[in-house]
Each structure stands twice: as structure tokens, then as C-alpha cells.
Amino acid sequence: MAKVGQFVIDPGAGSYCQITLDSGEKIVISHEKGGHKGGPLTIEVSRFFGLSSARIFRCDLDADEGRAALTQLTRDARPGSVAATPLGAFVEYLKTSRSVAEVKTKCAALETKR
């Protein structure tokens, strides 16, 4: 099972969480500053010991498509819980992924449901 790191929150910059997948690959899910629910959310693959990364997904939570994706991911979340936040919802959605390829597949499926 993937290892979910700490949720890091910087009021000036946003928040992020690193997940180490079963394959050993690491992804970072970031929710940039933009309010509690809005703004861009990105998923990147860490490369070269965390010194660089490659973006594999981006979602503007202020756009209709982003709001629809967030609504889908938080529909069963308890109000006020971490899973009800954008970062928490995406971590919950992706934490069972075994590889970056599976993360990409899940993100593509989420995009088609928007």
C-alpha cells in the first residue's frame, strides 16, 4: 500500500502532500493558494531525488470542470474532515494507486467524468 506523507500547509503558498507509491515512485499533490476550495491543484512526479518534477495532472478548481471533479471526490466525505478538502479528496482518491501509470489512468478517468 502507498505511503501518504504529512499534509504541509503554508498559508501564503498553499498546501501539498507527497505519496510514495508501491512502485517506489513519488507523487506530490499540490493545492496552490486560492482559497479553501478554489485555485489550481496539480499532481507531479518527483524525479532526481526530489530536485525536479514532471506535471502529470492539473485541475483549475475555480472552473466548472474542476468544481465537478471536486464535487465527485468529496460527495461521501464527512463535512469538515480532511477528505472534504481539495487536497484531502485527491489524496484519498489516489492513495491506493500502485504506480504513476495508475495515477495517470485515474486522473484521465476523472477528467472524462467531468
Image (tube, rainbow, N blue to C red):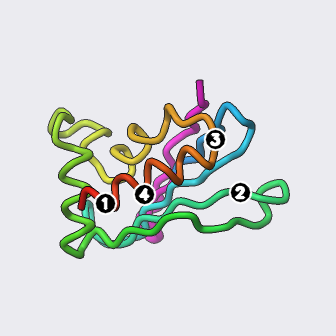
- Give the mark nearest the N terminus, 1 or 3: 3
Residue at which label 2 appears: 46
Residue 22 is left or right of residue 33, and the answer is right
Circle 1 sits on which residue? Answer: 112
Q: Please report the bounds of the magenta region as a residue range.
A: 1-16
- Which of the two discs, 2 and 1, labels the residue nearer the N terminus? 2
Q: List the residue tagged with mark 4.
A: 108
Q: Nearer the viewer, residue 54 or 85?
A: 54
Q: Are marks 1 and 3 in contact (CB under 8 Å)?
A: no
The Cα atoms of the two marked residues, 2 and 3, are separated by 13 Å
Marks 2/1: CA–CA distance: 25 Å
Q: Type of residue at label 4? A: Ala
Numbered marks: total? 4
Horizontal and vertical percent for residue 44? 60, 61
What amino acid is at disc 1?
Thr
For badge 3, the amino acid type reads Ser
Q: Residue at x 50, y 31 (%)?
A: 96
Magenta stretch: includes residue 10? yes
Residue at disc 1, secondary structure? helix
1 in relation to 103, above or below: above
Q: Helix, strand or loop at disc 2? A: strand
Q: Is residue 42 left or right of residue 24?
A: left
Q: Is residue 17 left or right of residue 106?
A: right
Q: Are marks 4 and 1 in contact (CB under 8 Å)?
A: yes
The disc at residue 99 is 3
- Report the quarter where the N terminus lies: top right
| Amino acid type, residue under disc 2 in the picture | Ser
